[in-house]
Image: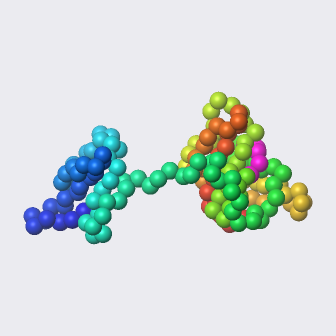
Amino acid sequence: MTTKTKDSEIEIYLGKANKIYGPFSPIELDQMATDGKLATFVWIWDHSGEHWKPLETPPPAPIKTLKTPGKAPEWSTDSALCYDQFNTVSGTLDAITETGCVLMSNHSGAVPKFAIKSHIAINVLDSKRKNAKKSEARVISVVREQNQWAYRLRWLTSR
């Protein structure tokens, strides 16, 4: 994302709204990040690949688009109990795939119990097999859906 000039200084170029800004030094870039000014830019020039790269990865897909079936789930869920060191939430798992799922919580409070990036444990009751399974996940997004909280989760352990 940077290149060296003949003076051995690193030059960094940023872009937004079809305009190029820079060059900036690494020190200037650090200061821009500290001041919150870096967040106003969308692109950074990648000299090695000679193309623009986004400064930020795109957000996850909206939960509504996740309702398409993925890989067949390893369990059928009657209920799920999710918890971290501070909170416990019950609900059901939806859109279960190899990479994650959506927890439709029974909690309807004004504020979600789990924040984005929270590491949570999940106990799932599988009534067809008459057992329970435990897994771990990270919260990737949280939205309010039909008076309940929908947590999009990414698996951290195999299920």
Residue 45: % across, % down? 28, 59
User: Looking at the magenta stretch, what is its main secondary structure?
Assistant: strand
Q: Nearer the viewer, residue 57 or 6?
A: 57
Res 95 quadrant in image: bottom right
Colour scheme of this structure image? rainbow
Residue in the picture at 71% in, 36% down? 146
Res 13 quadrant in image: bottom left
Residue 61: % across, % down? 56, 52
Residue in the picture at 77% in, 48% down? 92
Number of numbered callouts drawn:
0
Q: Nearer the viewer, residue 3 or 60?
A: 60
Q: Is residue 130 left or right of residue 157?
A: right
Q: Nearer the viewer, residue 84 or 112?
A: 112
Residue in the picture at 63% in, 48% down? 63
Q: Which residues are magenta?
A: 89-93
Q: Is residue 45 left or right of residue 133?
A: left
Q: Is residue 29 left or right of residue 68?
A: left
Give the quadrant of the C terminus. bottom right
